[in-house]
Amino acid sequence: MITEGDHERELLQATLQRFVEEEFYPHEELVDHTGEVPPDLGQQIEERGKAAGLYAANLPEKFGGGGLDYRSCALLERAFGKTSHALHSWVARPTEILLACTGDQIETYLKPAATGEKREVYALTEPDAGSDFMGIRTNARRDGDDWILNGSKHFISAPMMPDFAIVFAVTGSDDTPRGARKRITCFLVDVGTRGFDIQEGHRTTSYRGYKTFQLSFTDVRLGSGQMLGEEGKGVQLSGQLLGIGRIAIGATCCGKAERLFAYASDWAANRKQFGQPIGKFQGTGFKLADMAVEMRAADLLLADAVAKADAGTMTDMDAAMVKLYCTEMLGRVADNTVQIYGGMGLMEDLPIQRLWRDSRLERIWDGTSEIQRHIIARSILRPLGA
């Protein structure tokens, strides 16, 4: 288990760099052009990820995971962020919301997810509810000791067809000083359950080969043992996950920005116009300077939040700041890299256009930039009574 110590983290970084260069980079162009990760390639990546000790690295060792602390997990996400999500998601980091499993759920869902016997999807987003958590319409009603689930989800992502879904549904409402508030509950729903239909959904221009799924539930009967956590506590469960997920995205963006910056710097140093390297012109050199400053600031912001996460003191605002700044930093770095390359930056012969396309998604999923700004503003104003 890696917890503290620079030497251990240096070994981890060396392992990650080698793994990314050997297992991911050689397949990027194929996956981007075909829009698919061949199943045999995905399985190869998964098996080699297990052999390297990287599979389920974020989960505790007692459940079959790697037991990495958040700082070490951030190193993993930063390294994997340099390549396509379609490839590195085959080395699964199962959602930590599964740590809420109890009793038989541990053997049925948590441990199989940690060992790769099963794959899960996190099913929250709906056609009319993405950033608006309380806008979801999928619902579950009691029927004796069971629950009957109805509704639909979309934009649910995974590298392959999953084995089960972590589904958020409305199970009633509570009276609050601000009026009625939906009671959100989380369920574990096995693919193949009667009434549960799952199909591949939209193809995206970012991270080609990373699949989205559409889920529909028609009178799906669930036993009481398929409820994850307590009834009505889904918002709290999701909140714990989203903060760490946003930190992971921040780390991903720092990694991808580093790769783009290396391309931009090399091009600026070697591409010549008017008899000198284009990096010597202020229009290009100042872009590199700004990119370097923003990347350093993003790394420091990320390091601060990760340290707080390991200490158990990270707040929603900490996570939102990382998600907001790192994703927007990456957007500027990607755009400046294309600009430095000029027309070649948009040619499919080079990876720049792919990294640029992939970068755009980061400002949207797991809460848009607008949502992160809302969280930050709310965290500032609420203590002041506003």
Image (cartoon, helix red, strand yellow):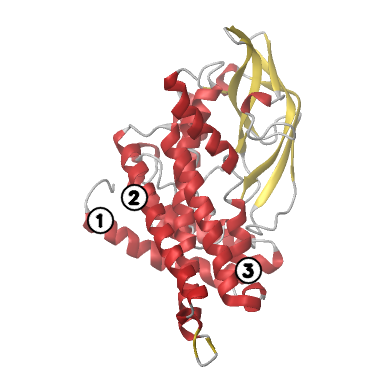
**For numbered disc 3, what is the local secondary structure?**
helix
Q: Residue 138: which quarter of the image?
A: top right
Of residues 338 and 75, the one drawn nearer to the viewer in this rendering: 338
Of residues 229 and 378, the one drawn nearer to the viewer in this rendering: 378
Which residue is disc 2 drawn over?
72
Q: Residue 50: which quarter of the image?
A: bottom left
Q: Residues within 10 Å of mark 2 (few under 14, many from 20)?
A: many
Left of 293 or right of it: where is 136?
right
Q: Residue at x 51, y 66 (%)?
A: 24
Left of 73 or right of it: where is 105?
right
Q: Amino acid at mark 1?
A: Glu
Depth check, mark 3 against mark 2: the one in front is 3
Structural distance between the alpha carbons of marks 3 and 2: 30 Å
In the rendered image, the vertical position of residue 140 relative to residue 159, given as above or below: above
Q: Position of residue 333 (x, y in %)?
A: 52, 62
Which residue is disc 3 drawn over?
353
